[in-house]
Image: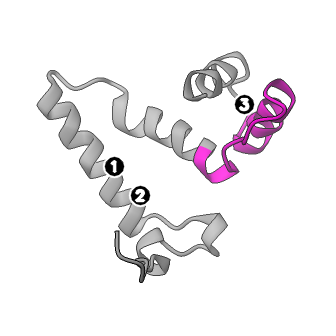
Amino acid sequence: MENYILNVKREHSSWGARKIRERLRHRFSGIPIPAKSTIHAVLTLKKEATQPAARNLLQQQTRFDDFIEIFSLHRPHEALAMKCPAEVYQPSLRPY
């Protein structure tokens, strides 16, 4: 699914998550489609955490870790009324 999202973005560089999600709905009818925010995260992850690629796997992992921290703790999300995920996250009361 991620590869398909990135391929559509390559084909249509001006398209955002909403248009790509609509394309996914038509292409993959009958299976759950990622939320707009998830598609946007796939496009944010590609741009912010992998281009250009780090020199080795440890450096690349550090870039991913930095991205996750910013994405979860500092970046406002439209789907969360411009709050960060860490502001609205509540752990489950059920034991794992």
Which residue is at the far bottom? 93
> In the image shown, does 21 or 78 lie closer to the viewer?
21
The residue positioned 80% from the left and 38% from the top of the image is: 19
Is 95 part of what is drawn in magenta?
A: no
Mark 3–mark 1 Cα distance, whole angstroms, equals 23 Å
Q: Mark 2 to mark 1: distance in Å? A: 6 Å
Question: Which circle's residue, 2 or 3, is located before the other in the chain?
Answer: 3
Q: Position of residue 70 (x, y in %)?
A: 35, 59
For badge 1, the amino acid type reads Phe
Amino acid type at circle 2 is: Phe
Residue marked by disc 2: 71
**In front here: 90 or 40?**
90
Q: Residues within 10 Å of mark 2 (few under 14, many from 20)?
A: some
| Lateral position of residue 93 relative to residue 78, left or right | left
Q: Read off the magenta span.
A: 14-38
Q: Quadrant of the C terminus?
A: bottom left
Left or right of 62: which side holds 41? Answer: right
| Local SS, label 3 | loop
Q: Which mark is residue 14?
A: 3
Residue 41: percent from left, percent from top: 53, 46
Q: Is residue 52 left or right of residue 17?
A: left
Q: Is residue 44 left or right of residue 8?
A: left
**Whole-number angstrom distance, CA of label 2 to CA of label 3:** 22 Å
Instruction: Give the residue drawn at x 16%, y 21%.
Output: 55
Circle nearer the N terminus (3, 1): 3
In which quadrant of the rendered image does the N terminus lie? top right
Residue 67 circle label = 1
Q: Position of residue 56 (x, y in %)?
A: 14, 22
Check contact, mark 2 vs mark 1: CB within 8 A: yes
